[in-house]
């Protein structure tokens, strides 16, 4: 694997997070005492966490020419994330997502994808793909053209230059675009999914079986996110169940994206399967313990402190994974 950046292809949004006491019934009002407005979208959230961990990362997507795009540009400028390949589409508004968060930490999203779907084939820079270590794709980028066509161009170039391809499926893309998702599976090195979507794709009866099926199809790293029940990760040598770390969850926005970042970081650093799963799980748990995503997502010191508190409470296998992660982050 080369030492290039992880290039993230997907939606770039502004998130507005609304904590409410309860989700209103139709016709009623949902009232909140505070609203957070920050850059978001799955690839952006993952990129922020990767950047926090010191991993080179870039974004490939679109924004409009509006105040939301200005906010995204200004916030990205505070990071080391490469925004060279973020395209501006003046005729469309920047993606905007309203996130309603209830006291149990569950979030419900209403999204306007806006400029995101206007990513075109000619927007895909071959040098960006050639110089990447991993092309990571959000499944939502396959929902609509021309963005979907741009994804296939990026995949074509990644295969041409032997760049590994990673996918976080998402449920809606699996439901709406099963043929495209099945086609993309054949080209993946890394697949990250959930039990419902992977069952729809593979007809599997359990997360363990799904992970085995993904690996037997040629995928090198498979992960099935099980929420508060933990996760299953697998490679060609082993399969590992990682329990969810216990936290007071207030908002699950960005938790799955943070988990994805942990797995990609572990892959780039050559961490063991348990260590990669431990890091991903810790990052996901920490993300769920704060409101919002973006700059609220965990940083290196935060995850180090958290894992150190977990060492004495963990099984031997988890403890070994924790120690490996602490050693890596402490030296990076």
Image: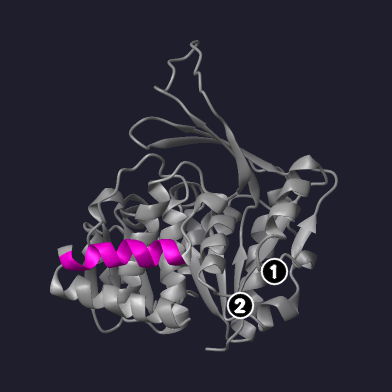
Magenta-drawn stretch contains 308? yes
Question: How many other residues sit within 10 Å of disc 1, few (<14), some (14-19) or many (≥20)?
Answer: some
Residue 202 placement: quadrant = bottom left
Marks 1 and 2, how far apart in space? 9 Å
Residue drawn 52% across and 57% down?
139
Q: Position of residue 291 (x, y in %)?
A: 46, 41
Q: Is residue 6 above or below residue 31?
A: below
Q: Which mark is residue 297?
A: none
Q: Farthest residue to the left: give it.
A: 315
Q: Secondary structure at mark 1?
A: loop
Would you call the spot at circle 2 few (<14 residues within 10 Å), some (14-19), or many (20 or more)?
many
Is residue 207 toward the left or the right of residue 59 in the image?
Answer: left
Q: Are marks 1 and 2 in contact (CB under 8 Å)?
A: yes
Question: Sequence-wise, which precedes: disc 1 or disc 2?
Answer: 2
Tell which of 171 and 311 is nearer to you: 311
Q: Position of residue 141 (x, y in %)?
A: 60, 56
Name the residue that disc number 1 marks. 82
**Highlighted magenta segment, given as a residue range:** 301-312
Q: Give 280 or 150, whichever is nearer the viewer.
A: 280
Q: Position of residue 298 (x, y in %)?
A: 46, 58
Question: What is the x, y in percent for residue 103?
Answer: 36, 30
Label 2 sits on a secondary structure element that is: loop
> Residue at (73%, 44%) from the top-left corner?
94
Check disc 2 and report the residue beneath it: 5
Magenta region, mostly helix, strand or loop? Answer: helix
């Amino acid at each position: 694997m080369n030492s290039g950046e992880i290039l993230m292809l997907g939606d770039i949004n502004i998130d507005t997070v609304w904590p409410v006491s309860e989700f209103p019934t139709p016709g009623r009002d949902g009232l909140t005492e505070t609203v957070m407005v920050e850059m978001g979208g799955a690839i952006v959230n993952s990129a922020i966490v990767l950047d926090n961990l010191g991993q080179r990362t870039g974004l490939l997507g679109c924004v409009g020419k509006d105040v939301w795009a200005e906010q995204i540009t200004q916030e990205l400028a505070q990071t080391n994330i490469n925004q060279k390949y973020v395209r501006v589409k003046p005729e469309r508004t920047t993606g905007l997502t309203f996130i309603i968060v209830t006291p149990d930490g569950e979030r419900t999203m209403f999204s306007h994808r806006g400029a995101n779907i206007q990513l075109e084939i000619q927007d895909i820079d071959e040098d960006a793909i050639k110089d990447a270590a991993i092309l990571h794709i959000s499944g939502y980028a396959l929902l609509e053209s021309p963005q979907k066509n741009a994804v296939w161009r990026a995949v074509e170039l990644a295969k041409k230059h032997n760049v590994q391809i990673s996918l976080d499926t998402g449920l809606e893309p699996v439901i709406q675009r099963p043929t495209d998702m099945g086609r993309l599976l054949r080209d993946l090195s890394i697949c990250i999914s959930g039990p419902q979507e992977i069952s729809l794709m593979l007809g599997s009866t359990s997360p363990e079986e799904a992970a085995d099926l993904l690996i037997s199809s040629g995928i090198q790293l498979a992960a099935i996110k099980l929420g508060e029940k933990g996760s299953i990760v697998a490679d060609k040598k082993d399969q590992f169940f990682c329990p969810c770390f216990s936290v007071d969850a207030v908002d699950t926005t960005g938790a799955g994206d943070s988990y994805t970042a942990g797995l990609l970081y572990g892959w780039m650093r050559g961490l063991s399967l348990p260590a990669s799963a431990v890091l991903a799980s810790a990052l996901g748990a920490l993300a769920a313990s704060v409101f919002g995503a973006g700059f609220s997502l965990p940083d290196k010191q935060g995850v180090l402190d958290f894992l150190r508190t977990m060492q004495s409470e963990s099984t031997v296998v988890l403890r070994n994974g924790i120690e490996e992660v602490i050693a890596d982050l402490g030296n990076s």
